Image (cartoon, coloured by chain):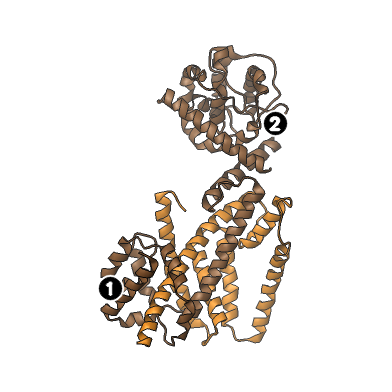
Chain colours: A orange, B brown
Amino acid sequence: MFYDEAMMNTYNMVKQRFIKKWINTLHMLDSSIEHPLNVTERKNAIRLSSDLAIAATRSGSTVWSRTLISRSGNKTTNLTTNKPMARRILKKARNRMKNRCSTLRRNGNFTAKVGVRKRTELLKSLVPGGELIDDKDYLIRETLDYIVYLRAQVDVMRTVAAVDLVTGNLTNDRTNK
Amino acid sequence: MNGGDLLLNCTDMSVLERQRAHLKYLNPSFDSPLAGFFADTSMINGGEMDGFLATAGLNLPMIYGQTTVVGDPRMSISPETTLGTGNFKKRKFDTETKDCNEKKKMVNREEVTEEEEEKSKITELNNGSPKSIKKMKNKAKKEENNCSNDSSKVTKELEKTDYIHVRARRGQATDSHSIAERVRREKISERMKFLQDLVPGCDKITGKAGMLDEIINYVQSLQRQIEFLSMKLAVVNPRPDFDMDDIFAKEVVSTPMTVVPSPEMVHSGYSHEMVNSGYSNEMVNSGYHHFNPMQQVETSSDPLSYFNNGQPPSMWHSDVQNLYGSLGV
């Protein structure tokens, strides 16, 4: 991955900052969300908190982090509010955003002939806030930044999941004994 | 803008690097002597020229017996016929006054003629050169002061090089728009290169479309992984709240290595083991292929909370050993 030692250290630092923030967001979310949740809702909550945390770790001038935070803001409001009216409004807003993205994605499989333009569109749809960026150069810079943090997020989540695995396994053993 | 640009960039860089290395070898005291010269003159390019300019100049001396200045490809003016080698030094001082494009053009025009014979050998390298130059930019700025006095030394080295490098392409546009465009393209390809390092398995691919494809795939796969992992975590934990993570965070902070799953948190003795054995995320990953994650669903209690209660060390130890065994540690 990173061939540079210094980069690796920075990367580890990023991961540490991320996990701390993630714990915080999880706690925050946990206290504000109604229990019990089914698996899907739990997943969404975890995903949401994770995205929020990674965006907060970046907390810089990147478009993607700001977009993630504002998106997460919408989602948390959605999760925590009980009022049906508010829910409907938020849902509409989200769907509108989703539709825009899916239209781009629907363009399907690209052959090499289709070219750079369509791929750029697709990339824009993938990177949060990419649609807002016109300059291709800036888009690539954003993507670079986003990839690094995305990777950190995946690494940490994978680790935590593995820990859960181990502890879960232990618990299993105990209950089976 | 197509794959050719990226490719050229690479080729050019390596060539330029070779040139610079060569120069350094020959004259360790300074770097690309011509660089500074052009760095002064090229305001737009911010001294990026140094790289290829230095290389460009390298080929000429044997003919002219002194260092010559190569035309800035970006300025890329159609070669004119006056030969100006004799005026080289004089021009140098002129340009060092940090004048703008016009001066540069003058210099270029006069020197470009010498290169006419080499025009035939000019390849698409020219296209790539502005980009590579851009990379040399920062280096060039440092060398600005060194170059002026040393350009004469370059003469000797010139004979040894066998490459003909970036040259102004015949009739290439010199207006500010195309220059800006070229600069922009340089930036893009530079970043594409960085992306190549970042996205695994990208070295073989050239061409913007292919690169973008890889990037898109990678981002998509990372996002999907996150989705999958959050589902996994949701399944394992009855509540989206990790009690253990407070401890986890502490452990993570103290561990210099990459984040390591730390069941050993409870027993610090083991943390040593795990860290020293080079336990990595990859191993963890392969580890849970052995386990069926769905097993966890049956447990009614939050497995994580067990940690807070502590566990008998012996059982812990044996379980951890089992984990290690399955991972093939």
- The quadrant holding residue A11 is bottom left
For the residue pair B154 and B205, the one nearer the viewer reads as B205
Q: Earlier in the sequence, mark 2 or mark 1?
A: 2
Q: Position of residue A43 (x, y in %)?
A: 54, 77
Q: Position of residue B168 (x, y in %)?
A: 66, 27
Q: Residue at x 39, y 64 (%)?
A: B259
Helix, strand or loop at mark 1:
loop
Q: Which residue is mark 1?
A: B267
Name the amino acid type tagged 2: Thr
Is B316 situated left or right of B234 in this image? left
Q: Residue at x 53, y 14 (%)?
A: B66
Report the disc number at residue B174.
2
Which chain is indicated by disc 2? Answer: B
For the residue pair A149 and B7, the one nearer the viewer reads as B7
Q: Position of residue A146 (x, y in %)?
A: 55, 58
Q: Position of residue A141 (x, y in %)?
A: 58, 52
Task: Calculate the distance from the C-alpha at mark 2 to the C-alpha at mark 1.
Answer: 70 Å
